[in-house]
C-alpha cells in the first residue's frame, strides 16, 4: 500500500479485529497483515500499549500442550474504537471530497 499507517489508525485496526472476537497474537497479526503491510515486531508493541491503556485485556488458554495468549477488547476499548470509527468517517469523507473528480470544471 502506498499510504503509511499512523499509530492511531493502526490502533483502530487492531481494536476492530479484536472487537469481532477474542484472538490470539498470531491470528491477529495475520488478519491485520491481510490488509496492511506490517511486521509482527511492529504489532506486538501496539498490543502491549493497548493493553497498558486498558483498551485490551489478555487471558491464556491451553492449546496442544501450550498456552495461547488471547486478546479481548474492554469497555474502554469499545469506546475508543467508536471514537476512531467516527473520526475515520469524517477523515475519509474529507479525503474523498478532495480526491473526487465529480463536479470538476473541465475548462480549468
Image: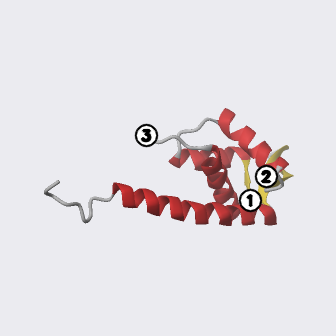
Residue at numbered disc 2: 70
Compared with 26, 72 (above or below) is: below
Compared with 48, 86 (above or below) is: below
Percent of width and height locating residue 3: 47, 42
Indicate left or right for 63 with 43 as reference: right
Q: Residue furthest left?
A: 107
Q: Nearer the viewer, residue 65 or 85?
A: 85
**Discs 2, 1 touching: Cβ within 8 Å:** yes
Q: Is residue 20 visible to the viewer in this orientation of the structure?
A: no
Indicate left or right for 37 with 95 as reference: right
| Disc 3 secondary structure class | loop
| Disc 2 secondary structure class | strand
Percent of width and height locating residue 26: 69, 44
Q: Is residue 103 visible to the viewer in this orientation of the structure?
A: yes
Q: Earlier in the sequence, mark 2 or mark 3?
A: 3
Q: Quadrant of the N terminus?
A: top left
Q: Earlier in the sequence, mark 2 or mark 1?
A: 1
Name the residue: 76% across, 60% down.
77
Indicate left or right for 5 with 106 as reference: right
Quadrant of the image occupied by residue 93:
bottom left
Q: Circle 1: is it few (<14), some (14-19), or many (20+) Cα within 10 Å? A: some
Percent of width and height locating residue 25: 72, 45
Name the residue: 64% across, 57% down.
17
**Discs 2, 3 touching: Cβ within 8 Å:** no
How far apart marks 2 and 3 lie (CA) works out to 31 Å
Residue at numbered disc 1: 22
How far apart marks 3 and 1 lie (CA) works out to 30 Å
Name the residue: 61% across, 35% down.
39
Q: Circle 3: is it few (<14), some (14-19), or many (20+) Cα within 10 Å? A: few
Residue at numbered disc 3: 2
Amino acid at each position: 500500500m502506498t499510504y503509511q499507517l499512523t499509530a492511531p489508525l493502526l490502533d483502530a485496526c487492531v481494536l476492530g479485529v479484536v472487537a469481532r472476537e477474542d484472538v490470539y497474537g498470531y491470528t491477529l497479526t495475520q488478519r491485520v497483515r491481510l490488509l496492511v503491510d506490517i511486521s509482527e515486531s511492529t504489532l506486538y508493541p501496539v498490543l502491549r500499549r493497548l493493553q497498558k491503556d486498558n483498551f485490551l485485556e489478555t487471558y491464556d488458554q491451553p492449546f496442544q500442550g501450550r498456552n495461547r495468549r488471547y486478546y479481548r477488547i474492554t469497555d474502554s476499548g469499545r469506546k475508543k474504537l467508536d471514537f476512531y470509527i467516527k473520526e475515520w468517517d469524517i477523515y475519509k469523507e474529507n479525503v474523498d471530497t478532495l480526491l473526487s473528480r465529480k463536479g470538476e470544471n473541465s475548462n480549468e
